[in-house]
Amino acid sequence: MKPRTTDDDIDIRPENVCPINVLTPFYNAWIIRALCVNKSPLRTYSNQRGQGKVFNFDVCDDSGEIRVTCFNDECDRFYDLIQKDRCYYIGRGMIKSANKKFSSVNNDYEISLTTHSFVKLCEDKQIEAPKLHYKFIPLARIAEMDANSTIDVVGVIRSVGEVESLISKKTSKELFKREVVIVDESLAEARLTLWGEQAQTFNGQTNQVLALKGVSIGDFKGKTLSARDSTKITVDPDLPENDRLAKWYRELSPDENFNQLSKTSDSAANFVSNNRFIGQIIPKKIQSGETLNFYTTATVQAFNRIQNHLYKSCGNNNCQKKISDNDGSGTYYCSKCDRTSVTFEWRLMISILLTDASGSFWATIFQDQAEKLLGKSVTELSRLYEEDQNLYIAAVDEIRLKQFSFRVYTRLDTYNGEIRMRNTIAQVFELKPKTFITNLMSSIEVLSRQL
């Protein structure tokens, strides 16, 4: 076999460069100059022929877009070279029909790179990223569509879940997911699942408009949406739909009912599996180093000494470490930043005794969630504390003997040779009695079927 010419030796002439939209399996001597707009992670797979690895990247020029796929040796050659938002010359690849099941790219063909292919960084001319073009589908239509279809949707964010960690049954690796619920003018409600980095970096909030290009339809307990590596996720997009949907949602009646595309009958089972009575949290059943993440509904019974609720912290670059007073001189020293300052920031850290019918435990709550629980900012609370501690006590006592729902992290620590349970409140939720009672009654049915 004739040795392959190195990519650096490739002679690329402008007259040989063709637009993406003319590529077909019958076009052989082609070279494209294109911008990388998306790059997937490197993945491994196993089939009857053995193990392998694969990654793909999507490129575009003024005429269109196309997906490029690399397997095995070509992964070694090109994975590090390919970077999003950089321009490349690509040639001598094999053009074949695109598998629409796994691609949302608007092209009937895709490129597979082989040992004869080349990819060369283009430094003589750059291509601007094209404006995304959407073909939005009303959410209500998803109910009629086939699973694994790839579509574009836009809607208003109704709720944003927390990032969850789980272990893949296939690979035993840790995965991250987040669920987002969106609605649109068709009065349908769809549940979107984000994975990996998309789940961890998503910054959308309720009432914002969310546009999704190339999202996949799933059929688990109804119809759901799932983002792929190539899905384009845009919050508050620069589109006419943004203002229209935002206005519609603002004027929507709070009693409006939405058609849920995915079944929610498993909410009672989730309530049973994710919620705990305090008496169920038994230290002997928690493995050393394990963190137990659960929800509980409990009453705030007591607090630690108010003198320990607030501490002075370093305000340098959001350091937040507790600082020491330099002998009443009006200056403060931070050991972490190794600096002295005349200013500080108040921080909240409160220990709370939570109680339900089965038992009680102490849990620590930090600033953001403490402000939410107390209904006051740290600025307000520190002012009350400094002016009149009785006013501070009255403000804190407003939530005493009130019920809330909490998300709690519990782990075992060793202190002075003794094993103790450390509880941290990760989230506080206002208790909604109607929803709580509905879930509680449904959970009784779930548990009774297990007897």
Image: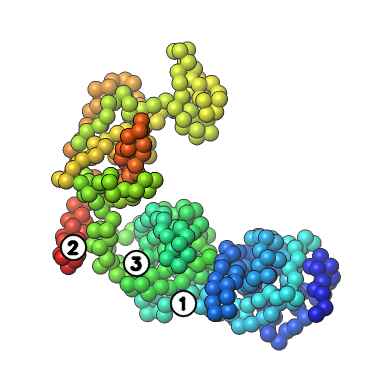
C-beta proximity under 8 Å, tags 1 and 2: no
- Choose mark 2 or mark 3, whichever is in front: 2
Q: Which of the image's four quarters has the C terminus? A: bottom left
* Nearer-N-terminus badge (2/3): 3
Tag 1 or tag 3, which sits nearer the N-term?
1
Residue 97 sits in quarter:
bottom right
Q: Secondary structure at mark 1?
A: loop
The colour scheme is rainbow
First reached walking from the N terminus: tag 1 or tag 2: 1
Question: Dot 2 lies on which element?
Answer: helix
Residue at x-position 55% and y-position 25%? 338
Q: Which residue is mark 2?
A: 447
Mark 2, other Cα within 10 Å: few <14 / some 14–19 / many ≥20 = few
Instruction: Give left or right: position of 89 versus 366.
Output: right
Q: Please state which of residues 142 and 118 is positioned toward the viewer in this rendering.
A: 118
Q: Which residue is mark 1?
A: 149
Image quarter of the N terminus: bottom right
